[in-house]
Amino acid sequence: MVSLAMSPVTAPGSASTAWLESVLKAFEPSLPAPGASLGGLPRRRSAARDELRRTGLPPTRQEAWRFTSLAPLIAVPPQVLPVPELLGPKPDHPPASGALRLYWDGDRDPLAGMDLPEGLSRLETGLQDSLLGTVLEVAGTTGSWLVRFNTALAGQVLALRVRGNVAVPLELVSDCGQGSGVRPLRLLLVMEEDASLDLLEVHRAAGTSLTSVLVEAQLAPRARLRYGVLAQGTESSCLLAHLAVSQAPASELDLTTAAGGWGLVRLEPAIIQVQGSAATRLRGLQVSRDRQIADLHSLVRFEGPNGQLDQLQKAVVDDAGRSVFHGAVQVPQAAQRTSASQLSRNLLLSDRARVDAIPQLEIVADDVRCTHGATVTRLQQEELFYLRSRGLGADQAARLLLDGFCDEILASLPKSASRWEPANALLRQALPR
Amino acid sequence: MTSTASVGDLVSQPYRYGFVTDIETEKIAKGLNEDVVRLISAKKHEPLFLLNFRLRAYAQWLQMEEPDWASLGHGPIDYQEMIYYAAPKQQAKKASLDEVDPKLLETFDKLGIPLSEQKRLSNVAVDAVFDSVSIATTYREKLAEHGVIFCSISEAVKDHPDLIERYMGTVVPINDNFFAALNSAVFSDGSFVFIPKGVSCPMELSTYFRINSGDTGQFERTLIVAEEAASVSYLEGCTAPMFDTNQLHAAVVELVALDDANIKYSTVQNWYAGDAKGVGGIYNFVTKRGHCRGARSHISWTQVETGSAITWKYPSCVLQGEDSSGEFYSVALTNNLQQADTGTKMIHVGPGTRSTIISKGISAGRSSNSYRGLVQIGAKAVGARNYSQCDSMLIGDTAAANTFPYLRSQQPDASIEHEASTCRISEDQLFYLQSRGIGLEESVSMMVSGFCRDVFNQLPMEFAAEADKLLALKLEGSVG
Amino acid sequence: MIRPDAPVLLEIRNLHATVGDQPILKGVDLTLRAGEIHAVMGRNGSGKSTLSKLLAGHPAYTVTAGTVRYRGDDLLALAPEERARAGVFLGFQYPVEIPGVSNLEFLRVATNARRLAQGGEELDTFAFEDLVCERLKVVQMDPAFLERSVNEGFSGGEKKRNEILQMALLDPLVAILDETDSGLDIDALRIVSAGVNQLATPDNCILLITHYQRLLDEITPDFVHVMAAGRILRTAGKELALELERRGYDWVDEGLASSDHAEADATALEVA
C-alpha cells in the first residue's frame, strides 16, 4: 500500500544540535576588527544566537523545509573558514574590462584600498545602523532560518549606497577555495531614487565549506538593479543565501540566479513591491547531479496596485540529484491590476533523480492577471530525434538541447558573468550519459 | 459606475434545504469512548471483524492530532459534545417503501429526491441516508438481476461480510489521517456498490445524504468495488438543515477498480454553508480515494462543491495498474465566509499511468477558496503523464483564491504539466451580455457556468443541469 | 427612406455626458424616424463611439444634461438589458470574447429575452436552431461558429458577422452600428453591409457610426451627420459624406472654431 499522507521526514537528531552549537561557539562574537563597520549588528547578533539555540536546525516537518535534506550542512566542519593570506585577481578569471571587482571573505573589508566609481559609496555607519534589517522586516522574513543563521554569525556588513547611474559593473566575489568551514557574508545595498547598478555576485567553493549569504537591497522610486548570482560549488560545499529586496514604485529589479554543483544550495529571493507599480523579473537556473540538492524558495508580494512579475525558474536534475522549487506569489486586496506570471520548467534526466515543484498563488484582488505553470519532463524526444536525423550524435544532440534550455536563463546574467563562463561552470558535469 | 453592475454584494438567497424534519429519533448519549464504539457496532449487529476494525481505528485515533496544515480557520471541535449515532425510529428493516415513515419519504420529496414507485427517477437507483441510517434503496431487485449489489453499508455487512472484509480499509487505511481514523471507529451508514466481472451497471446509482439532527456528527462510509471490466457511474448529493452550530461530517469513500474496470464518481455537495455572517454550517472533512488496482482501470472523480462552512477534501487516485488512469474534475464555489480547501492527489505508481486534473474555483464574498493538489510520479511509472489545469475566478475584491499544487517526479520518462490562471468577470463582458437583453445575474451565472463547463460536461446528464442551477442559486446575491 | 410622417423612434436632445470628470458629449441633438438610415461621421475622439455606448447604457458614461427618448419613453432610465429587450441594439466596434459561454446558448437566451418583451413565446432549443440557421444566411456565417464560445478566437470579420447575426435575431427598432466596417476586408464588408441592408425595414431605423466613406458606399444613408468635439456640427444628405471624403476633416475644424464663437447656439449649425 502506498502511503498517501504528506508525511514529514524524521526531524534531525542531536548530531545537528551539536553541530549548530559548535558553529555558534566558533563564531563567538569578539571585538570587531578595526575598520569593519559595526552597525546594529552586535545586538541583533546575540538575539539571533539565542533564537537559533532555541530552535535548532530547521525541522523537515516545517513546510518550508519539507523537501530539503540538511545532511550536507552538518558535514561541514563547524569552524570559521580560514582566510587566505592574499587576495588578488585570479589569473583564470580576470575581471571584465571596466568592471570593479570586490573580494568578499566575511573578515576583511572588501572596500579597503579600493577606488569606488562615481555613484557608489560606502553607506555611513549611522544610516547602516538604522537601515539594517528593515528590508527583512518589510518582507516578513526576519524569522527565516537562513536569516537567523547569518545574523548569528556575521561579524560585519558590506554596506553600499548607490546614487545615480553607476556606469561600472560591480562584481562581488567570494571564493572559498579548498578551505573547510563556515563563511558568513552580509550585504546591505541602498539604491536611491533613479539609481542604477549592474551587480554580479559570484560564489565558488571547492572544499567542505558553507557559505551563508544575507542580502538586503532597498530600491527607491525608479531605481534599477540588474542583479546576477552565479554560484558554482562542489559535492561537499553548501550555499545558503537569502536575498531580500524591497521595491518602491517604478523601480525595476532583474534578478538572475544560476547555481550548480553544490552538495546543498538553497536560495531564497524575497521580493516585496512595497506600493506595487514596480517591475520584477526573476530568472533562475539550478543544476544538480550525483546526490546534490538544489532548492529555490522564492516569495514575491505586491503591497500596492499595478505591479508586474515575470518569473521563470528552471532546473536540470541528473543522477540522484534533487531539485526543489517553491514559488509563492501573494496578491493581497490592495494589489489591483497586478500582472504576474510564473513558470517552472524542470528537466529530469535520471530515474534516481527527483523534482519537487510547488508553485503557490495567493490572490485576494479580483482585477488581476496571474498565471503560473510548471512542467517536469525529460528532454523532448521529438527534438532529440530531429537533431539526430540531421546527423548529430545522441550526446551531442542532448548537449545542444540542454545548452539551449540553460542559455535562456544564463543570457540574463549581467554581462561580466561571461568571464566566468557560467554555462561551462554549471553544466560541465551535468550531462546525460 | 452608474446604474449597473459593479460586482459586489446584495441580499443573500436563503438556503432551500434548511428545514428540519420533525421525527422521533433514537440517539445515543453524546461523547466518544470505547463503549460508544462497541455500542454502535452492537446496534448494527456487526460481525467481530468489524468491531475489531472499529476498535483498532479508535485506538489509532486517540494517538493522532487534528491536522492544521490547511490553515483553515475554525474554532476547536469538541469531540465529546457530539452524538455519534442517531437514527429515525422506525422498523429497522424496510421490506418495502410502504413501511418507511411517510415523513421521511416526504423529506426526500421536498429535497427533490422522490423515492416512491410512482415518482422516482426513471433511470437512477437511489440510496437515501437520513442521519446515521439508510432508509431506502430503490431499484435493488432490478439491479440484482444484473448481479449488481447496491445497498447500505450496514446491510452489506450483514449480507456480504466477505466482500466488506476483503475491501474495507484497503484503500484508506484506518490510520490514514485523523478524520479517516475517526470515521473508521464510528462510521454509521453509507452505500455499498459491487459490480461483478464484465457487468456494466444498467443505471446510474446515487446516494442522497441528509443530516437532520443538530448535534449529530455524520460519519458515512462508502465502498464501491468494480471487478474486471465492470463499469459504474455513481452520484452523491448532500444537504442539511440550517443550525447555528457547526456539524461535523467526516466521511470516507473507497473505490476499487480491477483490470479494465471503470468507476465514475460524482458529487454535488450542498451541505448548509452557514449564514452570511459565517454562523453555523457543516464542517466537511472528507477522505475520498480510489485505487486503480487493475491494468487499464479508470477512476474519475467529478465534484461540484457549493455548500459547507468548511470543505476539506482531496478525492484521489492511486494509479497502480499498468496504463490505468485517473481524472479529477472539480468546481468549488465559495461565498460569504465559506472556506474550501480542496483538490486531489494523483499517485502514479504503475507504468503508462495517466491523470488529468481540471479544477475551477470561484470565490465570492469574503470566502477563501484553495486548490491543493499533489501529482506524484514514482520511479517505476515509466511513461506516466499528468496534465493539470487550475483556474480561479474572483468575484469582488474581498475573496481569496489560492493555488497550492505540489508536483513531484522521480521518473524521467514521464511528464507533468501544470497550468493555472486567475480571471474575473470583466465589466465589458457583463455589459456585452446585458446589451443583448440578458439580465445582470443571469449574465454572471452564464459566465460562471461557462467557466465551469469543462467540469459540468463530466457530470451525468441528469445532474449537469441541476449543478448549473445550484451554482446560479448560490451566486444570487453575490452581484449587484 | 425619408417619410416626414413616420413615427419618431429615437430623439436625442441636448445630450451632455462625461466619462469620469472628462466631458465627452457637449450637447448632441439627433432625431431618428422609422425607415431612416443615419450616418454619424467624425474623427477619433469626436465622441461618436461614446454616443453609441451611452445609448446602449454602458456604465462608464454619466449623462450630465439632456434627454434621450425612445418611442417617447425615457431611454436613459433603463438598464442595458431593458434597452436591448425594448429593441435598441448596439453593434460593438470591439465585441468582447467570453470564454466558456456557448455562442448558441448566448444567442438563444438573448433572443428569448427579446421575444418575451415583445409579447411572443420563448423558443425551445430546436425551434431556435431552425431560426438561427435561417438567420445565418443573412451574414453568410458558418454554423460552426455557433458551437464556439462567444467571439472567442473569432477573426475581426467573424466577430462583426456575429454582431449582425445578433441584430438579425433580436429584430431591433433602433440599430446602432459602431464602426462596423473597421477590421473588415472588402469581401467581408460587402457581406456585412448586405446583411444590414436586408435588415433595414420601413419600421426600424439604423444609426451608422463610421470614420470612412467606404461603408456608406455599401449602405446608403438618408442623413449624414458630422460630429466633432462632442457635438453634431453639420447634417446633410449622403453627399456630405462624399464631401468629407474629398476634403478631409480639416474643414470640420474650421467649423468647430467658428462654433466656439457661437457656443450659445451650437444647434444653429444643424440643418433645420
Image (cartoon, grey):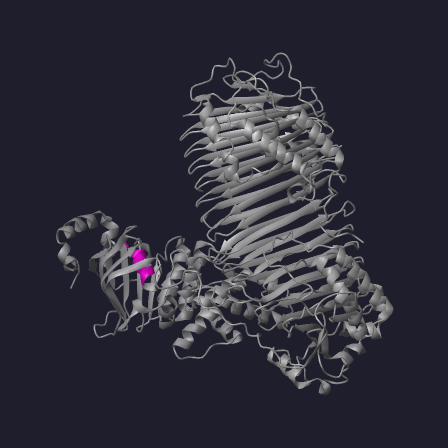
- Please indicate whether residue B79 sits to the left or right of residue A372 in the image: right
Q: Residue at x 54, y 54 (%)?
A: B401
Q: Is residue B287 above or below residue A302?
A: below
Q: Nearer the viewer, residue A316 or B199?
A: A316
Q: How many marks?
A: 0
Spot occupied by residue B210 in the image (x, y as percentages of width and height): 65, 73
Spot occupied by residue C257 in the image (x, y as percentages of width and height): 16, 48
Q: Nearer the viewer, residue A427 or C39?
A: A427
Asked where in the image residue B82 lies, by quadrant, the reply is bottom right
Q: Which residues are magenta?
A: C47-54
Spot occupied by residue A172 in the image (x, y as percentages of width and height): 55, 22
- Please indicate whether residue B193 sits to the left or right of residue C183 in the image: right
Q: Nearer the viewer, residue A406 or A102?
A: A102
Q: Residue at x 36, y 63 (%)?
A: C90
Spot occupied by residue A379 in the image (x, y as percentages of width and height): 68, 39
Quick check: can you spot residue A406?
no
Quick check: can you spot residue C133?
yes
Q: Residue at x 17, y 51 (%)?
A: C255
Q: Nearer the viewer, residue B22 or A374?
A: B22
Q: Is residue B474 above or below residue B95?
A: above
Asked where in the image residue B298 lies, by quadrant, the reply is bottom right
Q: Residue at x 68, y 27 (%)?
A: A23
Q: Is residue A51 above or below residue C196?
A: above
- Please indicate whether residue B423 sits to the left or right of residue B153 in the image: left
Q: Quadrant of the C terminus of chain B?
A: bottom left
Q: Quadrant of the N terminus of chain B?
A: bottom left
The question of residue B146 being in magenta is answered with no
The prevailing secondary structure element of the residues shown in magenta is: helix
Asked where in the image residue C10 lies, by quadrant, the reply is bottom left
- Please indicate whether residue A211 sits to the left or right of residue A128 in the image: right
